[in-house]
Image (cartoon, helix red, strand yellow):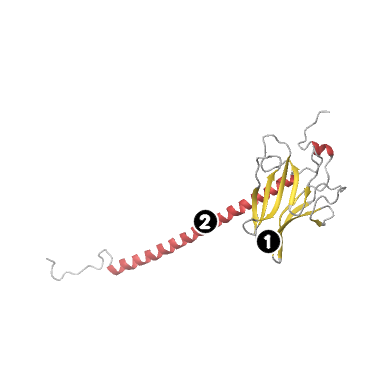
Amino acid sequence: MPRRGWKRSPHAGGFTLVEILVALAMTGMLVALLMSSLYYGTRVQASLADELQVRERSLRRVDWFASSLQGCMPLAPKTGAAMVATATEITCMTVSPLQARAQPSPQRIRWTLRKSENDPRIAELTYKDLDDSSSSELVVESFPASQARFAYVGVNGQEVLTWPLTAQSPETLPRLIYMVLEDGRTAQVAWVTALLADPWLEQEAQNPFGLELPR
């Protein structure tokens, strides 16, 4: 039985129901804000990771294209043929093929630009090792372009669509190789690759690895 006349002391501990509800409401709001920020941050991180992966794959393919062409020999040791290229195809002997063999010998390779069989608005860049009969044509990259072509620049700086310039041309390799991608009225230059424009000596062409050959 409570005592008559008992009053709560103003210094007694504890919270009222209203204070507890207010604290719970504020805690819920803080948790909701934190969860929203965490969710947004996770989505941004995932989006950036996907974009970085796409950029990394694209840069790797650009490097494949550049390194294989920068390793092209001005003159093939056996046939004496130099790089032969058109607006849609590049063929040469290279010391840096994509599909390297056990023996580090130069290999004939071919880069081709063509329309996709599934979508005429897509251009495909393909690679093939011509010296390997078991090698299949590899689709390296696809571009949203209705027209695509290779372009070549010699020492004089003029853009041409075939290489070599003439049958008696002293330039065995162009200074630059790049792709021109056209989609309707717009055109853009992509995958610019710098090559050696000066002809190599015959000895260097026959011995691309710098080994001292027996006389």
* Secondary structure under the numbered disc 2 in the rendered image: helix
Report the residue marked by disc 1.
Answer: 146
Q: Nearer the viewer, residue 179 or 134?
A: 134
Residue 154: x %, y % from top left: 82, 52
* Secondary structure under the numbered disc 1 in the rendered image: loop
Tell me the tag on residue 202: none
Q: Is residue 1 above or below residue 45?
A: below
Q: Is residue 13 above or below residue 52?
A: below
Neighbours of disc 1 within 10 Å: few (<14), some (14-19), many (20+): some
- Residue shown at the point (86%, 50%) measured from the top left: 166
Looking at the rendered structure, the kind of residue marked 2 is Ala
Q: Nearer the viewer, residue 43 or 206?
A: 206
Q: Is residue 34 left or right of residue 12?
A: right
Q: Is residue 18 above or below residue 155?
A: below
Report the residue marked by disc 2.
Answer: 46
Residue found farthest to the left: 1
Residue 134: x %, y % from top left: 65, 40
Q: Nearer the viewer, mark 2 or mark 1?
A: 1
- Residue shown at the point (83%, 44%) measured from the top left: 199
Q: Is residue 89 left or right of residue 8?
A: right
> In 3D space, how far apart are the residues under numbered discs 2 and 1 (Cα atoms)?
32 Å
Q: Nearer the viewer, residue 102 or 176?
A: 102
Indicate the quadrant containing the N terminus: top left, top right, bottom left or bottom right: bottom left
Indicate the quadrant containing the C terminus: top left, top right, bottom left or bottom right: top right
